[in-house]
Image: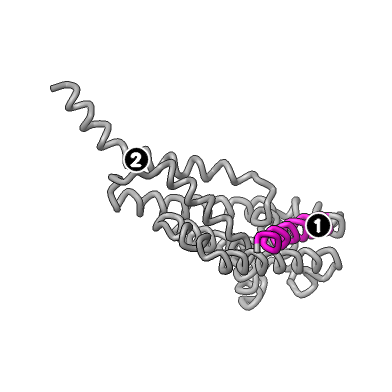
Amino acid sequence: MPGTAAQRHNRRMDPLHTVLLTVGLFAFTFLSPGPNLLVVVQASLAAGRTAGAMTGLGVATGDALYSGLGLFGMATLITAGGALFTFIQMLGGAYLAWYGWRLLRGSGTHGLPVASAPQPVAGWRHFRRGLCTDLANPQTVLFFAGIFSVTLRPDTPPWAKATAWLALVAASLLWRVLLCHLFSRPLVRRAYLRCQRALECLAGAGLALFGLRLAYEGWTRR
């Protein structure tokens, strides 16, 4: 029957639609001026492409962890814990506020090489900074859980869920790589060096305010 054939065709197309819709919804967040964007751009401008890439890898790793928790229904478990969620939120807010204060004080990049080939140790420091920045906001897991609640259904096959998760992580990583390539270009970095202090103050203020808001929300929800 034609109707039955069309239904079978739609069922076959559902997994692909799931993957595309998941990545599409996530992509809307790419241009949001949040701490993840700020920390990747700042590292790329101040210390070059490798630093930006390692920072972006850290952010993407955090996205992988939080989206995995959201995919497997752990968001409810985390938020139901109450005290755990509050602790993570306050600790993350304190970290972002501290890092933003370092930038405002002008010490955020003093230890980072401006040369085109940073030392490997510095690279892992950037990775840790990107990971901590992403994990600092536990509400991210709720965001991913919200995406999956829209794009996944109870009958979605496991391989489609895994593919959607992998596509989301790949999109996160590719976006951060694109950012670090754009903002580590010599022309862009030379322009940055001319107004480095002002831009670091702007990034520091943004990170500090976001961190203070997170910590305040965690404190008031105790």
Q: Which SS class for mark 1?
A: helix
Please give the range of residues in magenta. Answer: 199-221
Q: Report the quarter where the N terminus lies.
A: top left
In percent of width and height, residue 52 lies at: 64, 61
What secondary structure is the magenta-colored segment mainly?
helix
- Which is more N-terminal, label 1 or label 2? 2
Residue at numbered disc 2: 16
In this view of the protein, which residue sits in the foreground, 119 or 109?
109
Q: Along the line of sight, which residue is nearer the eye, 41 or 160? A: 160
Q: Which of 6 and 118 lies nearest the eye of the viewer?
A: 6
- Mark 1 lies on residue: 205
The residue at the point 80 percent across, 69 percent down is 102
Whether residue 164 appears in this view of the structure is yes
- Residue 164 placed where, x, y %? 39, 49
Q: Report the number of numbered marks.
A: 2
Q: Secondary structure at mark 2?
A: helix
Q: Residue at x 51, y 41 (%)?
A: 25
Magenta span includes 203 = yes
**Residue visible at 86% across and 55% down in the picture:** 198
Residue 50 appears in the picture as rendered? no
Image location (x, y in percent) of residue 185? 69, 53
210 relative to 138 in the view: left or right: right
Quarter of the figure with residue 192: bottom right
Give the amino acid type for the residue marked by disc 2 in the picture.
Leu
